[in-house]
Amino acid sequence: MNMTNPRIIAVSSGKGGVGKTNFVANLALFYASLNKKVLVLDADLGLSNIDVLFGIAPRFNLKHVLMGEKRMKDIIATGPLGIMIFPASSGVRELTGLTESQRLKLLEELDNFDVPFDIFLIDTGAGISDNVLFFCSAAQETVVVVTPEPTSIADAYALIKVLSRDFGEKHFRILVNTARSEKEAFDTFRKLAIVADKFLKLSVDYLGYLPMDQHVKDAIIAQKGFIAMYPNSAFSKKLAGIGKKMLESPLTEMKGNIQFFLRKALRMR
Ligand SMILES: Nc1ncnc2c1ncn2[C@@H]1O[C@H](COP(=O)(O)OP(=O)(O)O)[C@@H](O)[C@H]1O
Ligand SMILES: [Mg+2]
């Protein structure tokens, strides 16, 4: 297994519809274009999932593993540029109510899961449900996506609050999506940073921003990744900058381990 510095990054948000899935899909494409092995765990129960964005239809998902019908590595679907997609959006809810035999089955599966990857991106879904929280706390890094809307900022704050208070997470990177200018993006970040500092005594990092771009919807309709369709757009350039920045941050060794991650995320020790 390729365990040289794998990165496990959870992408989350307080509120749905802020652009998580679009960000994860395009970030995956960016890393794949750098010849990185990318694994995407789709745990978002929302409507437009990673598979839809990539125009693929995975036949199996985590549910089949839980039912003992499939092995974990057999449910992985392949997207563009060899991106591996682990379809978990169906089955994630069931993780909270496993029977003892399902639990044992899953533990055994986790131990045998040896798909090599360089980058593991988790589209966690939104809000403060158990699954979102566990995926975030198990990952090496948590990126919280916000938009300039006040409700998005308030909900992001609520997510950060629970993750820091109940899960001991202290490190958050904020991505501002659909900003109309650099200034609007930074103002949005600042609003969140101020309340996090004041009420949680927490300093959050500014990861960067992605501009609002009407073509994002076209790329979804065409079921191609945006950065592949519009490589010279401001969005694609910003995305590449963010992707590179994320590769530069130091790694916590323990948390780069997939078994460690999966066990923690699935609350199994
Ligand atoms: N930077 C952007 N510019 C324009 N539209 C965007 C942008 N990012 C996301 N969208 C659109 O916003 C909607 C929600 O995005 P999505 O990634 O599905 O959000 P989430 O996964 O957070 O629910 C989609 O219709 C998507 O096309
Ligand atoms: Mg989504």
Image (tube, rainbow, N blue to C red):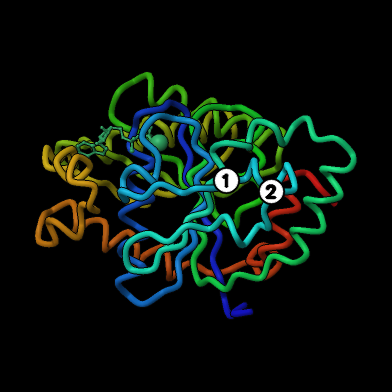
Instruction: Tell me: 72 left or right of 248.
Output: right
Q: Is 45 above or below relative to 259? A: above
Q: For residue 65, which numbered disc appears in the image?
A: 2
> Three-letter amino acid code at disc 2?
Val
Q: Is residue 256 visible?
A: yes
Under tag 1, what secondary structure? loop
Residue drawn at point x = 54 percent, y = 66 percent: 7
Q: Is residue 237 visible?
A: no
Q: Which class describes the residues within 10 Å of circle 2: few (<14), some (14-19), or many (20+)?
A: many
| Quarter of image, res 233 | bottom left
The N terminus, quarter of image? bottom right
Instruction: Tell me: 248 left or right of 182.
Output: right
Tell me where residue 16 appears, x and y as whole percent: 41, 27
Tell me where residue 226 appears, x and y as whole percent: 20, 52
Ligand 2 positioned in quadrant: top left
Tell me where residue 61 appears, x and y as whole percent: 57, 46
> Three-letter amino acid code at disc 1?
Asn
Check mark 1 vs ligand 2: CB closer than 8 Å? yes or no. no
Instruction: Tell me: 182 left or right of 263.
Output: left
Instruction: Tell me: 157 left or right of 243.
Output: right
Query: 98 and 248: which one is in front?
Result: 98
The answer to whether marks 1 and 2 mark residues whose Cβ atoms lie closer than 8 Å is yes
Q: Residue furthest top?
A: 151
| Quarter of image, res 231 | bottom left
Query: 122 and 60: which one is in front?
Result: 60
Q: Which class describes the residues within 10 Å of circle 1: few (<14), some (14-19), or many (20+)?
A: many
Q: Is 53 above or below relative to 193? A: below
The residue indicated by pointer 1 is 61
Q: How many marks are shown on the rendered structure?
A: 2
Q: CA distance from mark 1 to mark 2?
A: 7 Å
Tell me where residue 151 appears, x and y as whole percent: 38, 19
Query: 165 and 104: which one is in front?
Result: 104
